[in-house]
Amino acid sequence: MAQGSNASDALARYDRRALTVCSIGSHSALDVCFGAKKRGLRTLVVASRGREKTYDLHYRTRADGGCVDETIVLAQFADILDPAVQRDLLGRNVIFVPNRSFEVYLRQRYTYDEIEAGMLVPFFGSRRLLRAEERGEDSADDQYSLLDRAGIRYPRRIAGPSDIDGLTIVKAPHAKVSFERAFFLTTDPLHYRERSAELVERGVVTVDGLSTAVFEEYVVGPTVNLNFFWSPLLGELELLGTDTRRQTDIDGARALLAREQAALGDGYVPGMEEAGHIATTLTESMLEQAFDLGSRFVKAAYEAMPPGIIGPFALQCIIASGPPKSFVVYDVSLRIPGSPGTKYTPYSAYRWGAEMSVGERIAKEIAAARDADRLGDVCT
């Protein structure tokens, strides 16, 4: 097992007949729990006080269904690193499945180094790779460098406001929700100064936040998330499903007629905050290109940060017009994606003969590793 003797020692002490799959109570926890139950594993959700009813009431396990066996309620998600909580999780034979909420909430209090060291329970997947989702993290292996290593196209980066030379998307920390980003479009340096000043005045972004903003060319095209799974047990890359985002409040604006859109005014800036996902599919001619991207990314991650990818990851793409059409990767998710609806696209069934959610695919890998005495190959 790579990355940490703590996890290795924990697995050696675990009762492998009583493994418990655990996740932070947000993002994709229900998908993790439902998949684990289908594969005969126990489930546990670590919830934040005030947000626990979803797990310990509405979807708790009962005789006629449900999927959450147990819920631990903490004052804040970041309290999961408290030594007493870690001892509790270890006593329950927990294998932890990290999601995006785990990262963003804990990062408000801890560094990535502190998170990796403080989580004594084994992770399904690579705990080291979580930091590579960031742009400009204090590492040579953020998502840009991994995409460069893999030879995968992403939107052209623009150095700063004075270099804006066309339609550009600006990604800055949100002023009111620190772990979210605010997005806005601009076209030239003057337009940027006007638009950014307006957003600062409205309390959407801050001057300090703008100083760390990312500027990228805006690639025009439909978006699709390629949700992959790399199995160390099989040595195989799978495309589990494809989806796209629903966002507030831009999806509502798109539904308006031109006259109604004009009524929003020149100062309107859509929030573009994620509200959910919907299943989508690819033309079959693009599948080979999709698998090529995924394979190159797996290889690059392994070379940069062994053991590299374990389990789910997603390349979030724009399909740029051709000919030929091609993928441009605008973001990377190095853990379970946030959409449980990917199973409603046909790709997992093409491989396994039946639809399979990401949560179930994780549980399938854990159970297979347990039975083959190879948990050390899928946990870190």
Image (cartoon, rainbow, N blue to C red):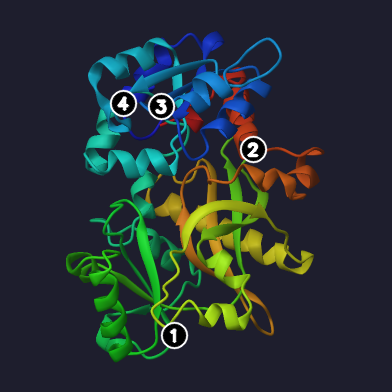
Residue type pointed to by label 2: Leu
Disc 3 marks which residue? 47
For residue 169, side relative to residue 62 (left or right): left
Secondary structure of the residue carrying tag 4 is helix
Q: Earlier in the sequence, mark 1 or mark 2?
A: 1
Q: Looking at the rendered structure, which numbered label has been put on residue 234? A: 2
Q: Name the residue rendered at 80%, 37% in the picture.
A: 354
Disc 1 marks which residue? 167
Disc 1 + disc 2, Cβ < 8 Å = no
For residue 190, side relative to residue 377 (left or right): left
Secondary structure of the residue carrying tag 2 is loop
Q: In which quarter of the image is residue 373?
A: top right
Local crowd at mark 2 within 10 Å, few (<14), some, or many (≥20)? few
Disc 3 + disc 2, Cβ < 8 Å = no
Residue type pointed to by label 3: Ala
Rendered-image quadrant of the N terminus: top left
Q: Which of marks 4 and 2 is nearer the N terminus?
A: 4
Alpha carbons under labels 4 and 2: distance apart? 32 Å
Looking at the picture, how far across and down is residue 330, in whole percent?
48, 67
Q: Earlier in the sequence, mark 1 or mark 4?
A: 4
Most distant residue in the right direction: 353
Alpha carbons under labels 1 and 3: distance apart? 41 Å
